[in-house]
Image: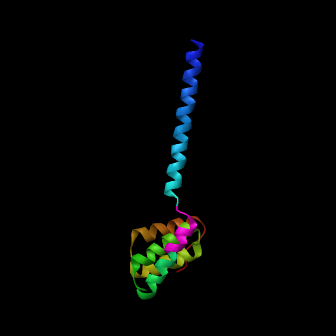
Amino acid sequence: MLYASIGIVVIGFAIISLLFQQDELNTLDKTRSISEIQEQIQETITYLKSNPKDGRALKSLGALYKEAGLYKESVSAYISASRELPGDREIQRAFIDLRARGHAPSN
């Protein structure tokens, strides 16, 4: 009986350990490296040099800057995007989030 109880506890710990490992792997899969984000920022900037009025690209740039923690640049990109896409809900939500982080967009 004692061995059965110990076995159940050991199996329980093994299962819990596997669940935590799987959760960590999922987090790593979802997280992009800063170098990947910087590469995407550069690609978007290159594209915008030829297409400066592309509101979707400007909005994407704002999101990339925000993901990289470059909040001042993010606000600037979102302001430009809002000029091209007035009333866009995603941009409005981004402004709310940035304001909550202490990076209020200037008007």
User: Where in the figure is residue 96, as x and y percent of width and height?
Assistant: 50, 67
Q: Give yes or no for residue 34 being in the magenta stretch.
A: yes
**From which residue to which does the magenta span run?**
32-40
**Residue 50, percent from left and from top:** 42, 88
Q: Quadrant of the N terminus?
A: top right
Percent across and percent down for residue 57 are 42, 77
Question: Left or right of 52: which side holds 36?
Answer: right
The rendered magenta stretch, by its main secondary structure, is classed as helix
Is residue 94 magenta-colored?
Answer: no
Q: Is residue 20 in view from this perspective?
A: yes
Q: Is residue 100 above or below residue 11?
A: below
Rendering colour mode: rainbow
Q: Is residue 51 above or below residue 93?
A: below
The residue sitting at 54% across, 28% down in the picture is 12
Residue situated in front as seen by the camera: 71 or 35:
35
Picture coordinates of residue 107, whole percent (x, y): 52, 80
Q: Please state which of residues 25 and 60 is positioned toward the viewer in this rendering.
A: 25
Say whether residue 66 is visible.
no
Please report the residue visible at 56 percent of the width from the left and 37 percent of the height from the top.
17
Instruction: Name the side, left or right, on which 63 lies relative to 86.
Output: right
Q: What's the residue at 47%, 83% (across, down)?
A: 46
